Image (cartoon, grey):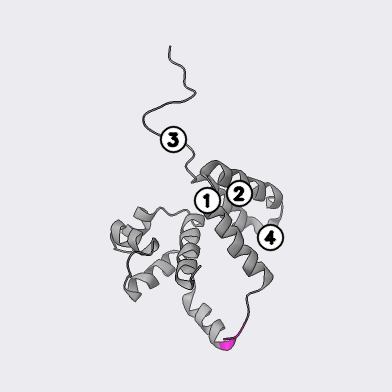
Amino acid sequence: MSNHNYFLNLLVTVIRLKGFKQCTLAKSIDSSHTTLNRFLNGNSDIYAGTLLNIFEKLDIDFVSILEEHSRNPNKKLSKEDHIARDISKVLSQLGPLQKKTLVSTIIQTIKRNKYLENETNNLITYRDNINTVITGGNNVGSRSS
């Protein structure tokens, strides 16, 4: 996976974890949903100012990230960073029910840890925003009177 695609996958994951929908985020940064969607899918670029607005809305301290990198330009990813990337990739490949089950398992494992309260709440929001209902056409499992 290229760095560009990796970055976009991480950004999409953060957007979901923060509970944003693309259309809501786009409105909050004075951009169109189409522009944001095309960027997040890797089909177009956006202005640097728009990207900085996205970081601001997602509460990502981009300046601190750059400063840290400038202090440690050759820093290798930790094992935890690699695992986080792998989990993100696995989640992106799962269907909605599998994704919801995996995230629920993680939540059950960490929910009593008071030091992970924010992370637990973010995961709950992410899980609750996973759409597992198939709409339209065939209502499998429904009964008619």
In terms of secondary structure, where does tag 1 sit? Answer: helix
In terms of secondary structure, where does tag 4 sit? Answer: helix
Residue that label 3 marks: 134
Alpha carbon distance from label 3 to label 2:
20 Å
Q: Amino acid at mark 3?
A: Ile
User: Can residue 28 be seen at all in this image of the molecule?
Assistant: no
Indicate which disc residue 126 carries. 1
Rendered view: 78 above or below 145:
below
Give yes or no for contact between labels 4 and 1 (Cβ–Cβ under 8 Å). no
Is residue 15 shown in magenta? no
Alpha carbon distance from label 2 to label 1:
8 Å
Residue 41: horizontal and vertical position, in percent? Answer: 39, 60
Magenta stretch: give its range. Answer: 71-75
Label 3 or label 2, whichever comes before in sequence order: 2
Q: Amino acid at mark 2?
A: Val
Residue that label 4 marks: 115
Q: Amino acid at mark 4?
A: Tyr
Identified at 71% across, 55% down, the residue is 113
**Along the viewing direction, whichever of 120 and 2 lies nearer the viewer:** 2
Residue 66: horizontal and vertical position, in percent? Answer: 50, 81
Residue 76: horizontal and vertical position, in percent? Answer: 63, 79
Label 2 or label 1, whichever comes before in sequence order: 2
Q: Amino acid at mark 1?
A: Tyr
Indicate which disc residue 103 carries. 2
Label 3 or label 4, whichever comes before in sequence order: 4
Alpha carbon distance from label 4 to label 1:
19 Å
Alpha carbon distance from label 3 to label 1:
18 Å
Is residue 73 shown in magenta? yes
Classify the position of the C terminus by image quarter.
top left
Alpha carbon distance from label 3 to label 4:
36 Å
From the image, give the main secondary structure of the stretch colored magenta: loop
